[in-house]
Amino acid sequence: MDKIRVLINREQLNDRINILSNQIEKDYKDKDLHIICVLKGSVFFTMDLIRNINQNVRLDFVKIKSYNGTKSGEINFEANLISDIDNKDVLIIEDIIDSGKTMNYLTNYLRKNYNPRSIKVCTLLDKKEKREISFTTDYTGFVVDDKFVIGYGLDYDEDYRNLPYIGYVDDEDIKHLKKDR
Ligand code: IMP
Ligand code: MG
């Protein structure tokens, strides 16, 4: 664990999330806001974000897996717990956008198979420089450099999700993460 460095601490997360929830609350005033939380990485972010929104929201979950270790791999729709989003204003909450493939896939899938009134995406982190597919988010917590990040929901092969901050490891230390934990 001592190889993990803090990239974004708890206070910075709280401050930024407060700003995002206030913005979302303003933008969705008098709308039927329907949140879709992308499992598992955005659970912490989603909960902190929506408990700050002073209006009714509905909450659904999807599970999409696109990562194998630190390499961007295939996209799999592992679970779909979406209820009725017909004519609803949908806001997808994601932990991090990297190549853009996952969010591109999910937004297209929802548009094709459901009938939402609108779809927007809120991501905690954006690795903008890694984009392979053009994809623009509507709300972004932090733009981050191309580092592998963990914590506050984000994992390295399913570990480290419960760190209360966003951490990173230097490239040469990633291979030690498993045996050091
Ligand atoms: P994309 O499809 O390449 O945009 O990948 C997005 C997904 O990859 C996210 O939902 C994360 O699950 C995962 N991911 C991308 N970068 C990181 C990282 O630095 N740490 C942990 N997971 C990551
Ligand atoms: Mg994810």
Image (spheres, grey):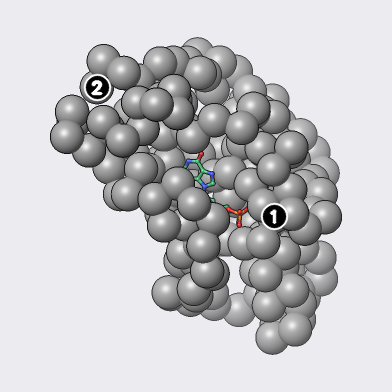
Query: Residue drawn 30% across and 49% down?
Result: 158
Note whether 29 is above or below 72 in the view shown. Answer: above
Mark 2 Cα-neighbour bin, 10 Å: few <14, some 14–19, many ≥20: few
Return the disc, 1 or 2, that comes first in the chain's sequence: 2
- Taking depth in this image into account, of 157 and 55 the one nearest to the observer is 157
User: Where does the image place residue 122, in percent across and percent down from the top left?
Assistant: 68, 46
Q: Are marks 1 and 2 in contact (CB under 8 Å)?
A: no
Find numbered disc 1 in the image and state the secondary structure of the residue it sits on: loop
Find numbered disc 2 in the image and state the secondary structure of the residue it sits on: loop
The reply to whether residue 167 is in sight is: no
Could you say which disc has been placed on residue 124 in the image?
none
**Quadrant position of the N terminus in the picture:** top left
Which residue sits furthest front?
172
The reply to whether residue 147 is in sight is: yes
Q: Quadrant of residue 86?
A: bottom right
Amino acid type, callout 2: Met
Query: Residue drawn 56% across and 15% down?
Result: 12
Q: Which residue is mark 2?
A: 1
Q: Which residue is mark 1?
A: 100
Note whether 132 is above or below 88 in the view shown. Answer: above
Q: Quadrant of residue 179?
A: top left
Query: Residue drawn 27% across and 42% down?
Result: 159
Amino acid type, callout 1: Gly
User: Where does the image place residue 79, in percent across and percent down from the top left?
Assistant: 43, 75
User: Where does the image place residue 51, in percent across and percent down from the top left?
Assistant: 51, 39
Query: Residue drawn 63% across and 47% down?
Result: 98
Q: CA distance from mark 1 to mark 2?
A: 29 Å
**Quadrant position of the C terminus in the picture:** top left
Note whether 175 is above or below 63 in the view shown. Answer: above
Q: Is mark 1 within 8 Å of ligand 1?
A: yes
- Taking depth in this image into account, of 102 and 114 the one nearest to the observer is 102
